[in-house]
Image (spheres, rainbow, N blue to C red):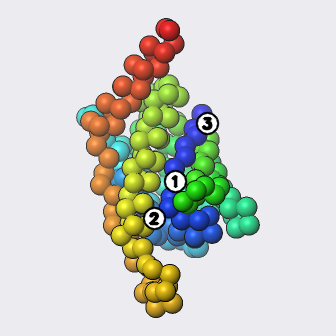
Amino acid sequence: MELQNTFEVPLPPSEAWDVLLDIERIAPCLPGARLTEVVDERTFKGEVSVRLGPVALTFAGKATIEEIDGVEYRARIVAQGADAKGRGGADAVVEFSLEPIDGGSRVLIRTDLRLSGSIAQYGRGVGMIQDVSTQLIDEFARSLRAHLAETAIPAADHAAQAPARPLPGAKPISGFALMFRVLWNAIVRLFRGRS
């Protein structure tokens, strides 16, 4: 299934690009994510945990940055993960790009996602998976913007800037809040279809 997401950051594309490719710094901004190993400069291992009501899913896997175009600000990432309890897995090809906007950059994300095993049963409808994806990306963007605002340095101080420190971790996403949002969006779609 194909998912589309966008978010904005208060940096011009040249600066936003450097931040978004610093995986060690931004991984903690994704709710429930934990970077476990840096294999090389383009390959990373980690875990992502999400609780959906009574069901806790933890995906352990690997992500590889396969293509980087620093001129057009485009990248392609391939990721594979499996649930720690053997309930299935997920494979994704994620393409993202940046475009300038007033006050910063818009990040455009297109994900080709394939779920397997019993995990695929949890999100049969594309709408539900899109809602979960949107919720996770929104929380990531909020956490990233908060960090950028906290670490903003006046231009005159850039020369004396200390090395970038890792971002604080995002709070794990609430299963209740996530399921409420998914259910609400499904109800809205149902009623829109009837009008």
Comparing 48 with 177, the one in front is: 177
Badge nearest the viewer, 1 or 2: 1
Please report whichever mark, 3 or 1, sits nearer to the chain's N-terminal start. 3
Give the residue at mark 2: 26
Q: Callout 2, which amino acid?
A: Ile
Residue 13 location in percent, x, y? 62, 64
Q: Callout 1, which amino acid?
A: Glu
Residue found 43% across the figure and 78% down from its top: 153
Residue found 42% across the figure and 67% down from its top: 148
Give the residue at mark 3: 2
Residue 10 location in percent, x, y? 50, 61
Q: Vertical placement of 117 versus 47: above or below?
A: above
User: What's the distance in space between the residues labelled 3 and 2, CA to CA?
Assistant: 23 Å
Local packing at callout 2 (Cα closer than 10 Å; few below 14, some 14-19, many 20+) is many
Q: Callout 3, which amino acid?
A: Glu
Q: Vertical placement of 162 versus 52: above or below?
A: below
Residue found 35% across the figure and 53% down from its top: 32
Left or right of 146 in this view: 102 = right
Name the image quarter holding residue 55: top left
Which numbered tag is attached to residue 8? 1
Local packing at callout 1 (Cα closer than 10 Å; few below 14, some 14-19, many 20+) is many
Residue that sits furthest to the top in the current view: 194
Q: Vertical placement of 137 versus 33: above or below?
A: above
